[in-house]
Amino acid sequence: MTRLLLRDARYVHHGVDGMPEIRRGHIAIDGSRIAAITESLNGTDFADFEPVDMSDKLVSPGLINAHTHAVLLVLRGTVEDIEGNLVYQYMVPASYLLEPEERAAIARLACAEAIRSGTTTMVDPLRHVADYAPAMIDTGLRLWLAESCADAVTTEVGNGTYRFDREFGATFLSRTRALIERFHGTEDDRVRVMISAHAPDNCSPWMLAELKKLAGQHGLRRTVHLSQIISEKKQVESLHGCTSTEYLQRNDFLGDDLLTVHWTFCTEQDVRILAETGTHFAHCPASMSAKGPHSLPIKAILESGVNIALGTDNMTEDMFHAMKLGLTIHRGAYGRSVTPTPNDIFNYATVNAARALDHPGIGHIAPGMKADLAMIDLMTPAMTPRLSAISNLVHYGHPGLVTDTMVDGRFLMRDRELLTIDERAAVTDAQTATEAMWERFETEDRGVPLPATDPA
């Protein structure tokens, strides 16, 4: 069992007010957990622990990515610059066109980027999850995995057709049951399974009821995209005569075990409903702002008391990017403002996300907590001059600042070297998989614009 003593560390401590502050001390790690934090050492204290010098580093809780699709990294640098219904005309087709080993290759690359970005936890709902789950698990990251379920035939929606088919939906329910049986609680509970409804427009009341029942049977958290895109909004209004939030409320799908994502077309009344039901919000400000600042009722959200977490969503696993854009967009709700603070944003990516996942053992640094940590190099230009380390991190942080990433007391990256992934092979394999997917996409002639590519 690993026993480490992180000596002479500056570390992020969450005080009684819930806000992060920087303290100094020595952090003892015994196995997967933080055993003790002490301000000083006597000669024989922790003598059998391996000393690790942290005098030039900031020890942070590992960042929690509350919503991502690792496999959709295959679209990086393409759909950000294309008009259209990106979800149904590009993302859904791409998720089907990849071969199993290609999904695993892209997911492995995503995990490499996440680890380099100081991320220790990823929440990943998509399709064909069993194809790439083992590759993600082998990286050592903490994971919540989910098969994204729908009973509208999602492969047809890109052509403007919504056709509900229970046999189609039953396939996803079967995959979800298989995921639970195979992966939930494995790796000493480092891997968990969630229940995922894709979105209100493609899940009928029958599907929502089946998913709610499955979650209850196994005591699982749930997640859903909510009011993400205009086609969802129009379809729900047309079919049910209400907003997506009202539709979920009518079907008893909201609640404090549900993590909802995006909220682009939520109304202020929707926000009130979501707040009253204790439903959590995962905001993905970077991916949703590729064509301009993400438009959503953020002032109402901030003032509602809803628990806000952060995700990267598509095309990147860089949580620093998400924090930076989140700060900008949320402050935009108040004009040129300093509300929310960098401390608030940092909490979105740590303690708030842990609350949304109902995992009290992650998200902050204290004795008894899981040793899920990221170490930040303080001797770098971006962190200097430094009066507030949290402010520097949120405003100017980037993956190059992260020297070490640890989950369950195990280094996944040490001294900027990935230990659980062959990085060069991951990059090469992912590039090969991406080129193969786009060749298939072009061959199928889907009648939508293709991305611009380099000539060589």
Image (tube, grey):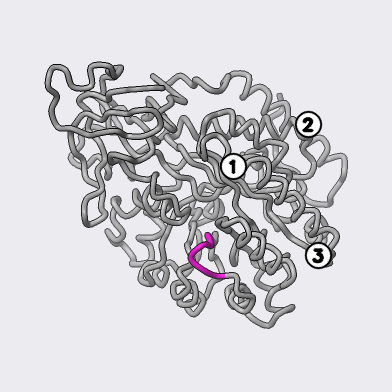
Q: Which mark is residue 436?
A: 2
> Alpha-carbon neighbours of circle 2 within 10 Å: few (<14), some, or many (≥20)?
some
Is 75 part of what is drawn in magenta?
Answer: no
Q: Which of marks 1 and 2 is nearer the N terminus?
A: 1
Apparent side of residue 148 relative to residue 9 in the rendered image (left or right): right
Mark 2 vs mark 3, CA separation in Å? 27 Å
Residue 170, placed above or below residue 206: above
> Alpha-carbon neighbours of circle 1 within 10 Å: few (<14), some, or many (≥20)?
many
Is 257 part of what is drawn in magenta?
Answer: yes
* Residue matched to label 1: 315
Q: Where is residue 74 in the image (x, y as percent from the top left)?
A: 67, 38
Residue at (25, 39) in percent of width and height: 389
Residue type indicated by callout 2:
Ala
Apparent side of residue 420 relative to residue 77 in the rendered image (left or right): left
Q: Answer yes or no: is residue 105 visible.
A: yes
Q: Answer yes or no: is residue 77 visible.
A: no
Q: Report if the CB atoms under discs 1 and 2 are less than 8 Å apart.
A: no
* Residue matched to label 3: 160
Main secondary structure of the magenta stretch: loop
- Which residue is more in the foreground, 12 or 293? 12
Q: What stretch is highlighted in magenta?
A: 254-259
Q: Quadrant of residue 98?
A: top right
Q: In terms of secondary structure, where does tag 3 sit? A: loop
Count every numbered label the image shows and give the total. Answer: 3
> Alpha-carbon neighbours of circle 3 within 10 Å: few (<14), some, or many (≥20)?
few
Q: Position of residue 443 (x, y in %)?
A: 87, 39
Residue 286, placed above or below residue 104: below
Residue type indicated by callout 3:
Gly
